[in-house]
Amino acid sequence: GAGVSQSPSNKVTEKGKDVELRCDPISGHTALYWYRQSLGQGLEFLIYFQGNSAPDKSGLPSDRFSAERTGGSVSTLTIQRTQQEDSAVYLCASSPDRLMGEKLFFGSGTQLSVL
Amino acid sequence: DAKTTQPPSMDCAEGRAANLPCNHSTISGNEYVYWYRQIHSQGPQYIIHGLKNNETNEMASLIITEDRKSSTLILPHATLRDTAVYYCIAPYTGNQFYFGTGTSLTVIP
């Protein structure tokens, strides 16, 4: 079956422009995560969606970052007025449920480069 | 979250067992320990998880100490394709998966 799909795989933008990154989770997975990984660094948690509950936005670095998840499926991460420090790989993951022992399934990420 | 501590890097000879340690001394009784790995330029991949008992699957074995303050991931016969960053995670119940910087394992021919 299809895994987690992210698009675009690469995005180059100019400083100050807005970008939208898309994540298609595995069908039926209720939990969805966004992470950011800068070059040579570990994964930085951004936001978490679980079913119809209010998302956990505690990891978003600034109000330029926002995310939504429509219909409990596809998610879009939006970065407004991009800055050079936003350059990173943005990873999306989904999991079947928030029960103990769940596994996260990751997409291949979107490489964002802000010039 | 329970804080986890891992060595930043390790080497292992091809064909030998790779033993990757993780300290999680603040773990609570109902927190699982998860291991993921990330091969260069790919998203992280789930390996194994456990609560109290040792676990084994087709990828690896997980040994958790009786006091649950530490664990060891064992790759029984390391191959060059096992070169990756290995993350040990102990998320608090109801909280998120926080990845640290992990252990960079290099399998040497």
Image (cartoon, coloured by chain):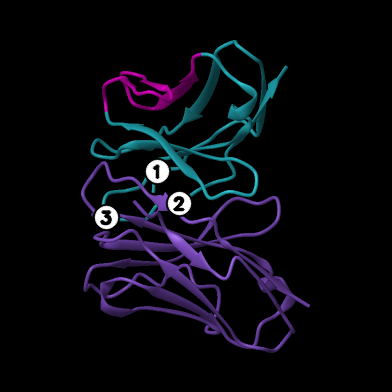
Give the Cα distance between marks 2 and 3.
12 Å
Chain A, hue in figure: purple
The part of the image, by quadrant, that contains residue B58 is top left
Residue A93 in the image: state x and y as whole percent.
42, 57
Label 3 environment density (alpha carbons within 10 Å; few <14, some 14–19, many ≥20): few
**Is A99 included in the stretch rendered in magenta?**
no
Q: Amino acid at mark 1?
A: Ala
The residues colored magenta run: B52-76
In contact (CB < 8 Å): disc 1 and disc 2: no
Q: Residue furthest top?
A: B16
Marked residue nearer the N-terminal end (1 or 2): 1
The chain to which mark 2 is attached is B
**Label placed on residue B2:** 1
The part of the image, by quadrant, that contains residue A103 is top left
Q: Residue at x 59, y 44 (%)?
A: B101
Residue B100 in the image: state x and y as whole percent.
54, 46
Tag 3 residue: B94
**Label placed on residue B98:** 2
- Choose mark 3 or mark 1, whichever is in front: 3
Q: Residue furthest front?
A: A1
Secondary structure at badge 2 equals loop
Q: Amino acid at mark 2?
A: Tyr
On screen, residue B59 versus residue A16, left or right, reads left
